[in-house]
Image (cartoon, helix red, strand yellow):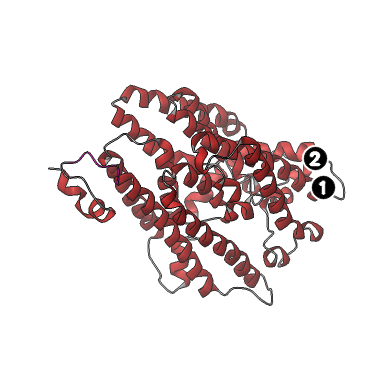
Amino acid sequence: MRTSARALIALAILASLLSFAKFSPCISTDWSTPGQYVHACYSDLPALYGERGLNKGEWAYSNGDASVEYPVVTGAIMWVVAKIVPTGDNALQNYFYANVFFLALLFIFISLIVAKMRPEFAYLTPLAPAAIASLYINWDLWAIISMLGAIYWFDRKKLDLSALALGLSISTKFMPIFLLLPIAFIFLRRNQISGALRYLLITAATFTAINLPVYLTTPEGWLRFYQLNLSRGSDWGSLWYAFTALGINLANLNYLSILVLLAAFAAIIIYILELRTIPSLASLSFIVLASVMVASKVYSPQYVLWLTPLAVIALIDKRDLHAFWIWQGAEVIYHVAIWQHLATVTGAKFGLPLYGYALITLLRIAATIYLIAIFVRRGLAGGTQGPAAHRSLREFLFESGNAYP
């Protein structure tokens, strides 16, 4: 079912308004605790306005350990918006409103970009309930739109534009750096090694051009994002946090999460090399980023905003729609669970205990893995280039090695 641009814009506007209504109970209470968790209207937008000195006009990376904990484009956006909004008694609300306006516009454009890549399923983006619930938690949409631009241009062979967009996206939120893995192996399948090197060079040059001035002027603030992520333990939403909550204590967590991620990457590489036809980046991006998020030490509720458009552009058969909706349902359940658990942690009379939260976390992860498996199975259904085609996901997982000497 193809949806017209006007209908998509209308759906995206409606989704943005519904999301604002969901976040609005916190506005009149200045996002007080535990109310912001009880009503599931917590947002980093107002929380970091004061905590990072943005309300005082301070540069996002000039406060050392109190600097913004995001890559530089996000920090610059946070700072610019703080500069243009009216101050005074309603400064916190004004800052939230301004960010909401820009994020709503981004969501509309994201819906239109998805329609360019997968017109028959484009309606899913503004209708996805977990995405609607998460629009205004953080600034992720700024990075998502440039990531989608990189995917769109890559699959249309506009490689220099794609590399520029990817460098911008990595400078906004670091997550898209993992797309370099499928990009490299798509180039390998095309036998375009020089093209791969050129793409990597442009991406790195874009990242350096954006980041170097901030690093040279405020190195401590620039490093904060990377230091926090390297030193982070198991955190909310992760597989590892759920295991710990259920009494399964794992040693050497950093090494274990890296090992799981490397195993996932190895499986993805084999999958790319096994496919009979060269895959598109659109068909691989969900598999890659979802795998990263399964293995990661943290899963923030707004991460579903990354995965939703990637899932839509990966869909090629309407028979797989059930898997998309199962996954969205699990994400909605998790969205409610994280806030109700945090309500309990911060002293609310009612909420979700740790054990229940851990089980729902595992449910969400299982639904994500299920959707990954559906996409992999659909790709394998097109055939492989090995001596014996894998007719099922089981054969791919356990018999791929038979095709190699």
Residue at position x 42%, y 25% from top? 157
* Residue 282 painted magenta: no
Circles 2 and 1 in contact, beta carbons < 8 Å: yes
Extent of the magenta region: 381-386
Residue 339 in the image: x percent, y percent? 62, 64
10 Å neighbourhood of mark 2: few (<14), some, or many (≥20)? some
Q: Is residue 383 magenta?
A: yes
Give x and y (percent) for residue 298.
50, 56
Q: Is residue 298 toward the left or the right of residue 22 in the image?
A: left
In this view, the residue farthest toward the left is 405
Q: Nearer the viewer, residue 369 or 81?
A: 369
Is residue 250 or residue 187 the one in the foreground?
187
The residue depicted at 54 percent of the width and 26 percent of the height is 209
Q: Is residue 187 visible?
A: yes
User: x and y percent of residue 79 in the render?
Assistant: 71, 39
Above or below, 215 relative to 263: above
Which residue corresponds to mark 1?
91
Label 2: which residue? Answer: 85
- Few, some or many C-alpha atoms within 10 Å of disc 1 (few <14, some 14-19, many ≥20)? some
Q: How many marks?
A: 2
Q: Residue at x 72, y 45 (%)?
A: 100
Residue at the far right: name it.
89
Q: Please, what is the three-letter code of the amino acid marked with disc 2?
A: Val
- Residue at image location 44% in from the left, 27% down from the top: 156
Q: Earlier in the sequence, mark 2 or mark 1?
A: 2
Query: Could you say which is closer to the camera, residue 61 or residue 2?
Result: 2
- Specify the amino acid type for callout 1: Ala
